[in-house]
Amino acid sequence: MKDESKCLHSGYTPKNTEPRVVPIVQSTTFVYDSTEELGKIFDDPTRGLIYSRFANTTVMAVEAKIAELEGGVGAMCTSSGQAATLISILNICKAGESIISVSQIYGGTINLFSYTFKKLGIECIFVDNDASEDELHAAFKPNTKAVFGESLANPALTVMDIEKFARVAHAHSVPLIIDNTLPTPTLCKPFEYGADIIVHSTSKYMDGHALQVGGVIVDSGNFDWTCGNFPEFTEPDMSYHGISYVEVYGKAAYIIKARMQLMRDFGCYPSAHSGFLLNLGLETLAVRMDRYCENALEVAKYLVASAKVEKVCYPGLESDKYYELAQKYLKGASAIISFTIKGGKAAATRFMDSLKMASNVTHLADIRTCVLHPASTTHRQLSDEQLVAAGINPGMVRLSVGLEHVDDIIEDIGQALDNA
Ligand SMILES: *Cc1c(COP(=O)(O)O)cnc(C)c1O
């Protein structure tokens, strides 16, 4: 099936007389006829459901759909994108070890990596998205366990050369983890370029309607956990009666370990109702993303032509620094545009406050057009130096183009620019 069809049909195939739509299985627990049967499920939790802290029928249908869209062997939903990133790393990295991350990433992820990971004893070494292969090799330490970056960065809008980062990560026998939130799997397929693990904030385009916060981790099944760098995958897990994940689960070792150890212990699993809503959003994802890209390109061209605008970043524009990489890795450039209005921070604020249809929210990738001023909101904890490293100008506005008619979006932006 193509993506449009996977969005509608993957993950749930009703049998004779069963409900057409994925049912909401709103239950904390699942019944078994005998103690022996339930005991067997404890031996191998992939054979049945136990408790909705780490697996639930409705959520698992969504997980299967997302795994198929990304081309992975399995997926696990989490209660937020942050939880997905946290677990994706803690599943392979512990105190005394390090990770490498591209510095152009989501502000919340920068906090997690620089401050909270430090408290947990995990060091994060930041590298530039445009670093050369030699510079990337030089960033590795003997204890480095993963490389992390965003396929299309929020809000810097840098495009990652996924093949380059995968080559370097694999030369050091560590996996490449890609946050694929902004393109979604319908615009970018990181596994096809060598990424090993994908995370998403499903709160964005996947849910698509600004209804609920969520995240997901997807496993390609391609990384060789027996390379010697990851003994937790090959040696017995004493918290799970001595199971060896690679031995028992083969290609799905990573994603099953994440569920059996970390979701069991942290319990940041979405509710069945959240899973149902996420599935509803995913059903139209491919169709929505195409229209988002069309609208955004038109708005970006309008902004470039405006005398009030100093600079426009949108990797779908031929003039953009990341156009070539976007052509290679993205089917479309998604719908986030960042631009700098002449007159700096004050003009940017006047522009934002003058918008009539677009809303000023701490969110993006909503179905409705919205704007955000990163320097005073999502990235306000960063120093000026960190802001620059993250690719953010203090006068920059982040615009998330919605699915209203593009003429209405442009009219609203035009009148607000006049007031700026
Ligand atoms: C929003 C976002 C996150 C965090 O996701 P939440 O669902 O808000 O926890 C992570 N990465 C990117 C790229 C994001 O845009």
Image (cartoon, grey):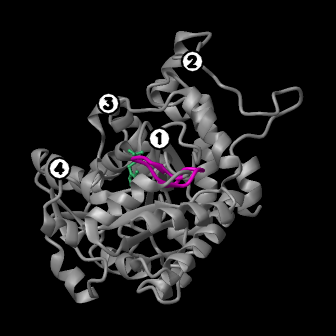
Secondary structure type for disc 2: helix
Give the mark toward the camera: 3 or 1.
1
Residue drawn at x 60%, y 19% is 26
**Badge 3 or badge 1: first in the primary sequence:** 1
Cα distance in 3D space between marks 2 and 3: 23 Å
Amino acid at the residue labelled 3? Asp
Cα distance in 3D space between marks 3 and 1: 18 Å
Amino acid at the residue labelled 2? Glu
Q: Which residues are magenta?
A: 358-370
Q: Nearer the viewer, residue 174 or 391?
A: 391
Q: Nearer the viewer, residue 245 or 369?
A: 369
Residue drawn at x 35%, y 69% is 156
Residue drawn at x 66%, y 25% is 24
To which residue does mark 3 refer?
265
**Badge 4 or badge 2: first in the primary sequence:** 2
The spot of residue 411 in percent (x, y) is 60, 64
Quarter of the rendering occupied by the N terminus = bottom right
Amino acid at the residue labelled 1? Gly
The answer to whether the beta carbon of the residue marked 1 is less than 8 Å from any atom of ligand 1 is yes
Query: How packed is label 3: few (under 14 Cα within 10 Å), some, or many (20 or more)?
Result: few
To which residue does mark 1 refer?
214
**Badge 2 or badge 1: first in the primary sequence:** 2
**Quarter where residue 407 is shown:** bottom right
**Badge 2 or badge 3: first in the primary sequence:** 2
| Contact (Cβ within 8 Å) of mark 2 with mark 1 | no
Give the mark toward the camera: 3 or 4.
4
Cα distance in 3D space between marks 3 and 4: 18 Å
| Contact (Cβ within 8 Å) of mark 4 with mark 1 | no
Amino acid at the residue labelled 4? Phe
Query: Residue 117 has which mark?
Result: 4
To which residue does mark 2 refer?
37
Give the mark toward the camera: 4 or 2.
4
